Each structure stands twice: as structure tokens, then as C-alpha cells.
């Protein structure tokens, strides 16, 4: 069951966001990059499926698509850790 899409579909409109579409793709760099390439929107929300797992490719795939290196941002980690409800 895709609980991420259900949660986002319930909460984003309540926050004033207009949800245009959702897409579920396989957990491969190619599938994730393909979904990003198909997007025509200015804002794209990407979730990692089942949650944080050691083999999740989402972050690496998005960074590669954007041509950026991953970087650890302690202030964001601490914000998410201090407010788990806001990030769950």
C-alpha cells in the first residue's frame, strides 16, 4: 500500500498545494530519473517508498538527475529529528 501518496494527497491540499499527479516507479536510478524527466511542474515531491532503508536509491538518483553531489546538512537533520511528526 502506498501510504506516502495517501498522506500527501490528504495533507498537501490542506496546506494550499494543488496536486497535479502522482506516479509510482520502480526502485532503480533509471526509473526515478525517468519520472523526474517526465515532470513538467516547478515543484516535485519525491518519496523513497517504504522509508529509510540502507539500499534506498532515491537520494542518489535525484542528486544524479540534478547534477548535484549529496551533502549532509546537520541543521536539517536536527530539524527533522526534533519534529518527527512534521516529517513523517
Image (cartoon, grey):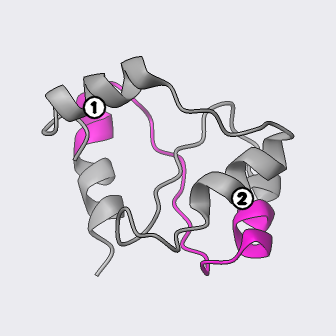
Is 20 displayed left or right of 88 in the figure? Answer: right
> Quadrant location of the N terminus?
bottom left
Residue at 59% across, 60% down: 58
**Is 68 or 36 nearer to us in this picture?**
68
Residue that carries the numbered disc 2 in the rendered image: 61
When asked about the image quadrant of residue 61, the answer is bottom right
When asked about the image quadrant of residue 16, the answer is top left
Could you tell me how many numbered marks the image carries?
A: 2
How far apart are labels 1 and 2 at the CA level?
21 Å
Give the magenta part as a residue range: 11-35
Residue at 73% across, 74% down: 31
- Asked if the stretch drawn in magenta spans residue 71, the answer is no
- Asked if the stretch drawn in magenta spans residue 16, the answer is yes
Residue 44 sits above or below residue 78 on the image = below
Residue 77 sits above or below residue 51 on the image = above
Point out the residue furthest to the right here. Answer: 67
Residue 56 pos. (x, y %): 52, 69
Residue 32 sits above or below residue 14 on the image = below
Residue 88 pos. (x, y %): 22, 47
Point out the residue furthest to the top here. Answer: 75
- The crowding category of the residue bearing disc 1, from other C-alpha atoms within 10 Å (few below 14, some 14 to 19, many at least 20), is some
**Is 24 or 55 nearer to us in this picture?**
55
Residue at 46% across, 44% down: 19
Residue 54 pos. (x, y %): 46, 70
Numbered mark located on residue 18 in the image: none
- The crowding category of the residue bearing disc 2, from other C-alpha atoms within 10 Å (few below 14, some 14 to 19, many at least 20), is some
Is 46 displayed left or right of 6 in the figure? Answer: right
Dot 1 or dot 2: first in sequence order is 2
Residue that carries the numbered disc 1 in the rendered image: 80
Amino acid at each position: 500500500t502506498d501510504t506516502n501518496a495517501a498522506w500527501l494527497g490528504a495533507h498537501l491540499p490542506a496546506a494550499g498545494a494543488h496536486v497535479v499527479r502522482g506516479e509510482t516507479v520502480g526502485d532503480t536510478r533509471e526509473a526515478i530519473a525517468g519520472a523526474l524527466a517526465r515532470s513538467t511542474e516547478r515543484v516535485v515531491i519525491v518519496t523513497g517508498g517504504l522509508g529509510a532503508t540502507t539500499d534506498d536509491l532515491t537520494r542518489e538518483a535525484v542528486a544524479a538527475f540534478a547534477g548535484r553531489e549529496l551533502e549532509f546538512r546537520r541543521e536539517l537533520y536536527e530539524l527533522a529529528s526534533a519534529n518527527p511528526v512534521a516529517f513523517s
